[in-house]
Protein backbone atom coordinates (compact mmCIF):
# COMPACT_ATOMS: atom_id res chain seq x y z
CA UNK A 1 0.00 0.00 0.00
CA UNK A 2 1.35 3.44 -0.92
CA UNK A 3 1.97 5.96 1.89
CA UNK A 4 -0.81 8.25 0.59
CA UNK A 5 -3.31 5.39 0.57
CA UNK A 6 -2.23 4.42 4.08
CA UNK A 7 -2.82 7.97 5.36
CA UNK A 8 -6.25 8.12 3.70
CA UNK A 9 -7.19 4.69 5.10
CA UNK A 10 -6.06 5.72 8.58
CA UNK A 11 -8.08 8.96 8.38
CA UNK A 12 -11.20 7.06 7.31
CA UNK A 13 -10.73 4.51 10.08
CA UNK A 14 -10.30 7.24 12.66
CA UNK A 15 -13.42 9.05 11.44
CA UNK A 16 -15.53 5.89 11.52
CA UNK A 17 -14.32 4.63 14.90
CA UNK A 18 -14.46 8.12 16.41
CA UNK A 19 -18.15 8.33 15.51
CA UNK A 20 -18.72 4.92 17.06
CA UNK A 21 -17.21 6.08 20.37
CA UNK A 22 -19.02 9.43 20.37
CA UNK A 23 -22.20 9.56 22.38
CA UNK A 24 -24.95 11.92 23.26
CA UNK A 25 -26.78 10.84 26.40
CA UNK A 26 -29.88 12.54 27.74
CA UNK A 27 -30.73 11.88 31.37
CA UNK A 28 -34.25 12.75 32.47
CA UNK A 29 -34.11 14.16 35.99
CA UNK A 30 -37.28 13.82 38.04
CA UNK A 31 -38.13 14.45 41.70
CA UNK A 32 -38.00 10.66 42.14
CA UNK A 33 -34.52 10.10 40.64
CA UNK A 34 -32.72 13.37 41.39
CA UNK A 35 -30.73 11.74 44.22
CA UNK A 36 -29.46 8.96 41.90
CA UNK A 37 -27.73 11.38 39.49
CA UNK A 38 -23.90 11.57 39.37
CA UNK A 39 -23.98 15.14 40.68
CA UNK A 40 -25.77 16.63 43.64
CA UNK A 41 -28.59 18.60 41.99
CA UNK A 42 -30.83 20.92 43.96
CA UNK A 43 -33.74 22.66 42.26
CA UNK A 44 -35.57 25.41 44.14
CA UNK A 45 -38.19 27.88 43.02
CA UNK A 46 -40.22 30.74 44.38
CA UNK A 47 -43.36 32.48 43.28
CA UNK A 48 -42.73 35.94 41.86
CA UNK A 49 -46.25 36.84 40.72
CA UNK A 50 -46.62 36.06 37.02
CA UNK A 51 -43.15 34.51 37.02
CA UNK A 52 -41.53 31.65 38.86
CA UNK A 53 -37.89 32.13 39.79
CA UNK A 54 -35.84 28.93 39.59
CA UNK A 55 -32.39 28.09 40.90
CA UNK A 56 -30.59 24.87 39.97
CA UNK A 57 -27.46 24.08 41.97
CA UNK A 58 -24.96 21.48 40.76
CA UNK A 59 -22.12 20.23 42.93
CA UNK A 60 -19.87 17.26 43.51
CA UNK A 61 -21.21 14.29 45.44
CA UNK A 62 -18.92 12.73 48.07
CA UNK A 63 -16.51 10.43 46.22
CA UNK A 64 -17.64 11.74 42.83
CA UNK A 65 -16.16 14.21 40.42
CA UNK A 66 -17.12 17.88 40.34
CA UNK A 67 -19.11 19.27 37.42
CA UNK A 68 -16.83 20.57 34.67
CA UNK A 69 -16.20 24.29 35.00
CA UNK A 70 -17.14 24.71 31.34
CA UNK A 71 -20.53 23.02 31.88
CA UNK A 72 -23.56 25.08 30.98
CA UNK A 73 -27.25 25.36 31.69
CA UNK A 74 -30.10 26.44 29.46
CA UNK A 75 -33.83 26.93 29.80
CA UNK A 76 -36.39 26.50 27.05
CA UNK A 77 -40.13 26.86 26.76
CA UNK A 78 -41.21 24.48 24.01
CA UNK A 79 -43.27 25.82 21.13
CA UNK A 80 -47.03 25.57 21.28
CA UNK A 81 -49.28 26.04 18.30
CA UNK A 82 -48.11 29.21 16.59
CA UNK A 83 -45.97 30.32 19.51
CA UNK A 84 -42.26 29.81 18.85
CA UNK A 85 -39.98 28.29 21.45
CA UNK A 86 -38.62 30.75 24.00
CA UNK A 87 -35.19 30.72 25.61
CA UNK A 88 -35.20 32.54 28.96
CA UNK A 89 -31.93 34.08 30.09
CA UNK A 90 -29.98 31.85 32.47
CA UNK A 91 -27.37 33.29 34.83
CA UNK A 92 -24.54 31.02 35.98
CA UNK A 93 -22.55 31.56 39.16
CA UNK A 94 -19.58 29.24 39.74
CA UNK A 95 -18.15 29.43 43.25
CA UNK A 96 -15.72 26.86 44.66
CA UNK A 97 -16.90 24.16 42.25
CA UNK A 98 -20.58 24.75 43.01
CA UNK A 99 -22.55 25.96 40.01
CA UNK A 100 -25.86 27.77 40.40
CA UNK A 101 -28.11 28.56 37.45
CA UNK A 102 -30.95 31.05 37.93
CA UNK A 103 -33.76 32.00 35.56
CA UNK A 104 -37.42 32.99 35.41
CA UNK A 105 -40.31 31.21 33.69
CA UNK A 106 -43.82 32.61 33.25
CA UNK A 107 -46.24 30.54 35.30
CA UNK A 108 -48.58 30.26 32.29
CA UNK A 109 -46.05 28.21 30.26
CA UNK A 110 -44.55 26.15 33.07
CA UNK A 111 -45.91 22.89 31.62
CA UNK A 112 -43.73 23.42 28.51
CA UNK A 113 -40.58 24.56 30.31
CA UNK A 114 -37.34 22.60 30.74
CA UNK A 115 -33.89 23.22 32.14
CA UNK A 116 -30.88 21.35 30.74
CA UNK A 117 -27.51 21.01 32.43
CA UNK A 118 -24.86 20.10 29.85
CA UNK A 119 -21.35 18.74 29.86
CA UNK A 120 -20.11 18.78 26.28
CA UNK A 121 -17.09 17.52 24.29
CA UNK A 122 -14.80 20.21 25.67
CA UNK A 123 -15.70 19.14 29.21
CA UNK A 124 -14.61 15.52 29.20
CA UNK A 125 -11.97 13.41 27.55
CA UNK A 126 -12.83 11.35 24.48
CA UNK A 127 -14.96 9.22 24.14
CA UNK A 128 -17.58 10.95 26.34
CA UNK A 129 -18.66 13.95 24.31
CA UNK A 130 -22.12 14.77 25.57
CA UNK A 131 -24.23 14.34 28.67
CA UNK A 132 -27.44 16.30 29.12
CA UNK A 133 -29.51 16.29 32.33
CA UNK A 134 -33.05 17.51 31.56
CA UNK A 135 -35.50 18.78 34.18
CA UNK A 136 -39.18 19.24 33.24
CA UNK A 137 -39.77 22.21 35.51
CA UNK A 138 -43.47 21.62 36.13
CA UNK A 139 -42.60 18.23 37.67
CA UNK A 140 -40.63 20.05 40.36
CA UNK A 141 -43.02 22.95 40.85
CA UNK A 142 -45.96 20.50 41.00
CA UNK A 143 -44.51 17.00 41.69
CA UNK A 144 -47.97 15.36 41.50
CA UNK A 145 -48.53 16.53 37.94
CA UNK A 146 -47.92 14.38 34.88
CA UNK A 147 -46.52 16.17 31.85
CA UNK A 148 -46.11 15.05 28.26
CA UNK A 149 -42.45 14.64 27.21
CA UNK A 150 -41.28 17.35 24.77
CA UNK A 151 -40.78 14.89 21.93
CA UNK A 152 -44.53 14.18 21.76
CA UNK A 153 -45.75 17.76 22.02
CA UNK A 154 -47.24 19.42 18.91
Image: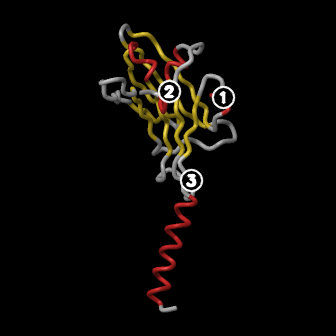
Name the residue furthest top: 49
Q: Residues within 10 Å of mark 3 (few under 14, many from 20)?
A: some
Position of residue 89 in the picture relative to residue 144 (left or right): left
Q: From mark 2 to mark 3, how far is it between C-alphas?
A: 23 Å
Q: From mark 2 to mark 1, how far is it between C-alphas?
A: 14 Å
Q: Earlier in the sequence, mark 2 or mark 1?
A: 1
Residue tagged 1: 35
Numbered mark located on residue 56 in the image: 2
Q: Of tags 2 and 3, which is closer to the observer?
A: 3
Name the residue furthest bottom: 2
Tell me the SS state at disc 1: helix
Q: Position of residue 40 (x, y in %)?
A: 61, 32
Tell me the SS state at disc 3: loop
Q: From mark 3 to mark 1, how far is it between C-alphas?
A: 22 Å
Q: Is residue 19 above or below residue 146?
A: below
User: Which residue shows up at 65% across the image and 23% down it?
Assistant: 32
User: Which residue shows up at 52% across the image and 23% down it?
Assistant: 148
User: Which residue shows up at 68% across the image and 37% down it?
Assistant: 62
Q: Are marks 2 and 3 in contact (CB under 8 Å)?
A: no
Q: Earlier in the sequence, mark 3 or mark 1?
A: 1
Residue tagged 3: 128
Q: Residues within 10 Å of mark 1 (few under 14, many from 20)?
A: some
Q: Is residue 130 above or below residue 113?
A: below
Mark count: 3
Position of residue 110 in the picture relative to residue 97 (left or right): left
The quadrant of the image that shows the C terminus is top left
Q: Nearer the viewer, residue 25 or 43?
A: 25
Q: Position of residue 14 (x, y in %)?
A: 52, 70
Q: Position of residue 69 (x, y in %)?
A: 48, 44
Q: Is residue 47 above or below residue 39?
A: above
Q: Are marks 3 and 1 in contact (CB under 8 Å)?
A: no
Residue 100 shows in this picture: no
Amino acid sequence: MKPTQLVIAAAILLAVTGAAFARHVTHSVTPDNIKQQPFSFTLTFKDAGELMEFAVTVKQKPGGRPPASSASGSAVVDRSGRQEAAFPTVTKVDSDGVQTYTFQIPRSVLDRARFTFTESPSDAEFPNPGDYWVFNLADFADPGAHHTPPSTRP
